[in-house]
Image: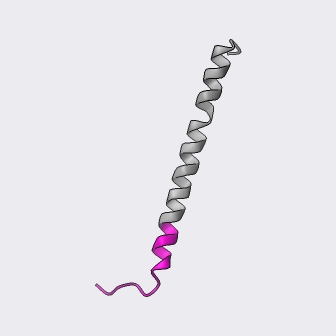
Amino acid sequence: MPKPINGSRAIAITEEEGVMRGVLLWLLGIPIPIIILLYVFHVV
């Protein structure tokens, strides 16, 4: 198998996947403490 001449493309893809995964985890993680706080203060 010949090595790809432009190796930066693979690095960019992995960085994008890492950022997307981080954003997804952040979006999933944000509502949980808010829901707990609302529950504690009997808002829900």
2 relative position to 15: left or right: left
In the rendered image, which quarter contains the N terminus? bottom left
Vertical comparison of 3 with 41: above or below: below
Residue at point 57% right, 37% down?
A: 29
Question: Would residue 23 be counted in the magenta stretch?
Answer: no
Whole-percent x and y of residue 35? 63, 24
Vertical comparison of 44 with 23: above or below: above
Residue at point 55% right, 55% down?
A: 20
Whole-percent x and y of residue 32? 58, 29
Residue at point 54% right, 63% down?
A: 16
Vertical comparison of 6 with 32: above or below: below
5 relative position to 26: left or right: left
The outermost residue toward the top is 42
Question: Would residue 5 be counted in the magenta stretch?
Answer: yes
In the rendered image, which quarter contains the C terminus? top right
The segment highlighted magenta reads 1-13
- Total numbered badges shown on the rendered structure: 0
Vertical comparison of 11 with 6: above or below: above
The outermost residue toward the left is 1
Residue at point 63% right, 16% down?
A: 39
Coloured how?
one colour
Whole-percent x and y of residue 28? 56, 38
The outermost residue toward the right is 43
